[in-house]
Amino acid sequence: MHTSQNSGLEHGSMLTPVIRPFLTDHYEVFMRMVRKWRHLKMVKRFSRGHDPDGVNATSPGECAVLCPACPQPGKNLPHGWQDVSKAKWWLYAIFVVINANFRLKRRNILSDKTDLSLAKGWAYFVEETEYKAFLAQHLGDDTCSSHNAVNMADMKLSQGLAATGVGTVNCTCHNMKRPNGVRDFQKGKSAYINMDYLFFSTLRGTQLQMLNVLYDIAYQWHKNLWARMKSFPHSHGLNYITKVIRFFVPKFHLPAHIAKCQTLFSFNFICFVGRTDGEAPERGWSNINPVASSTKAMGPGCHHDMLDDHFGDWNWKKTVGLGASLILKIRDALAKRDEHELAFEEFNTAITPDHCSAWLVEMQAWENNPNDTTIPNLLEAKATSITQAGTWLKLSEMEAEELQRGVNTSLHLEISRSVLIASSIDLEEEQHRLMAAVESLSLHATDTQKGSIVRMQNSLHCKIETWRHAQVLYLPAVQSIINHTAREIQENAECMKLWLPSPLRDKPCDPRLQHDEWELYYAQAHDALKEICQCLQIHCSLLSFKGEWIRAQNTLSRIHGRRTVCLKRYWSTWLALKALATELQDDDIKPLMDPFATGEGRRQVSWIWMMDSVDCGDEGDNDVDVVQGVHIEWCKSRVRALQWSEEVELLKEEMCRVLQFFAWQAAWWEEQGKWHVGECTAHTEGLQAYAARQANVCHRLANHFCIL
């Protein structure tokens, strides 16, 4: 249509003022010409002129641009694909997503008798006459929860409209409209009957053994689907008994559903789907929405033909870009596969062998029986009863352990090496507590508060001086440092440096003292990490509890304060273990199930949860919540590693299918060129030339994809 930068209509408006007064308005005639031209181009591109039976022999959906990467039996699947084991069915599964667009409305203008569609169901819209006959027999309304897909049809904004929107069935992974997968929503009609008809129309006759179906309200729509199918024509039936059909909710829409649906219908926790997100149609509407203002004022036939043309253009653009798209996807998938497999292996080594083997058996049983409700869902977090009293009890127990470590420490006249280092760690802990108490003093502290701090400083100072009498026996080089420091400044007890073996690298020191210090500090680092994990668990539980029931700011502040103390203890320990220990960054302080994390498929467990036997509590510690959290996260980590591996395998299969599809399509066009249906020699040669041109386009696309 465009031979220059201006359209044909614009060219007419550019005529000189002398000629323009003698012209009549031919806009409607011009638009009818455009509509016919689009229709002729469509049937030409799908070789309908080569068919001896003519254009009227066109089958439903035959003029739709097919997705080369999706499994198309007889076109891009390897020989013997039907005979593969059930474990490999997922490689030849089809992904379809049901969606609706309520911007593509149409006013109640004209009727089907006065404005017929030229395509007659040959492309993306279903055949109108057959559908209207079916609809006339099934006008019942279905009930559903509050959802746009159901409620939009009866809103006040639908007054004066013949169609309140458009429902579609798309290819999930590559965002292409499927043949006979588009239909208007009728005002006052149930959304279920529209979506059911689209679903069975686009999938009729499918030979594939596994189907993955996505819908925003799949949790409710699928419940009576097979019972509703019985009212459809036999040609629309789907043999669901012999097939594996699974239902999902797209990832972006999933958080709006209840917790149970978020695991049962989630792509994140199911095998044999790769890293599919299901949100492709939402990204595709941005291409078609700009034409809504034009199609809104069209009759039913023109409305369908216009959208058929735009959907065909969209599918072709996606086809041309498939090569670059798949290359980018597989590069990312290869990197993520290696990353998550390594992360799971590291996490797996931290789990005790008994738990590891037991959890693996349970997980495999759940994966192999997805529809068996008697098998518990291991990825679903069990709700725990959180009360203020229980939280205070947990905090008191943590403080009691701290008192057992610090307050009861006694110094003896005869001190061994290990006791010397252990006492120094206790003194450091007391220094941290005293420093926190000093920092908590306000500018207007009372004399009583100040006096309490001074007494604590004096008591700690005496303990340090007593400890130093034994220290100089094991570390004589420390004496000169202590004397020099005492002459230079007068330090408070909480700021006095203890001079353990770790900062004395250039001084003579007993290697056994360094070994004892390492062992004790290493144990302290693990204790600090464990307390951080406990604080994070309680913090997450309180956030959920607070959001539903109470304001727990004071309790949350205590948890945050406790976590800060643990962090300071770890950092001071890390200074002594800098050469060997892993540095703790702020980004590492993450709970197992972070409520603020985004991207389930790309996140990783922080290394603080990968300590040895992290899935076991201490003796006498019945920490069920932590063990349960580790169990769930272990299962999720395993699923993430498996899904990225599946994604790589699935993308490789899709790349092979694309090349096979172009090879099949090129051969098909070459066969079309052999038909002699022309009225004359010139006509026949034109048909052959066009078929050869189309075959050449397929060969060039395949060659281009191969060199990417």
Image (cartoon, rainbow, N blue to C red):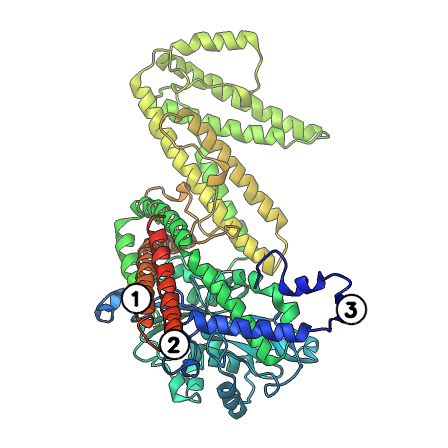
Query: What type is the residue that disc 1 sits on?
Result: Ala
Asked if residue 149 shows in the view, the reply is no
Question: Toward the viewer: 592 or 522?
Answer: 592
Above or below, 561 relative to 328: above
- Residue reaching furthest to the bottom: 137
What residue is drawn where x is 57% and y is 73%?
Answer: 35
**Residue that carries the numbered disc 3 in the rendered image:** 21
Q: Quadrant of residue 159?
A: bottom right
Q: Left or right of 389: which side holds 479?
A: left
What residue is drawn where x is 59% and y is 25%?
Answer: 455
Q: Which mark is residue 603?
A: none
Question: Toward the viewer: 646 or 267?
Answer: 646
Q: Position of residue 165 (x, y in %)?
A: 60, 74
Disc on the earlier residue, 2 or 3: 3
Query: What type is the residue that disc 3 sits on?
Result: Pro
Q: CA distance from mark 2 to mark 3?
A: 44 Å
Per the image, label 2 sits on a secondary structure element best described as loop
**Residue that carries the numbered disc 1 in the rendered image:** 667
What residue is drawn where x is 51% and y is 46%?
Answer: 396
**Residue that carries the numbered disc 2 in the rendered image:** 680
Q: Position of residue 323 (x, y in %)?
A: 39, 54
Q: Left or right of 549: which side holds 258?
A: left
What residue is drawn where x is 54% and y is 67%?
Answer: 310
Above or below, 408 relative to 117: above
Which quadrant is the N terminus positioned in?
Answer: bottom right
Query: What type is the residue that disc 2 sits on?
Result: Cys
Q: Position of residue 235 (x, y in %)?
A: 38, 86
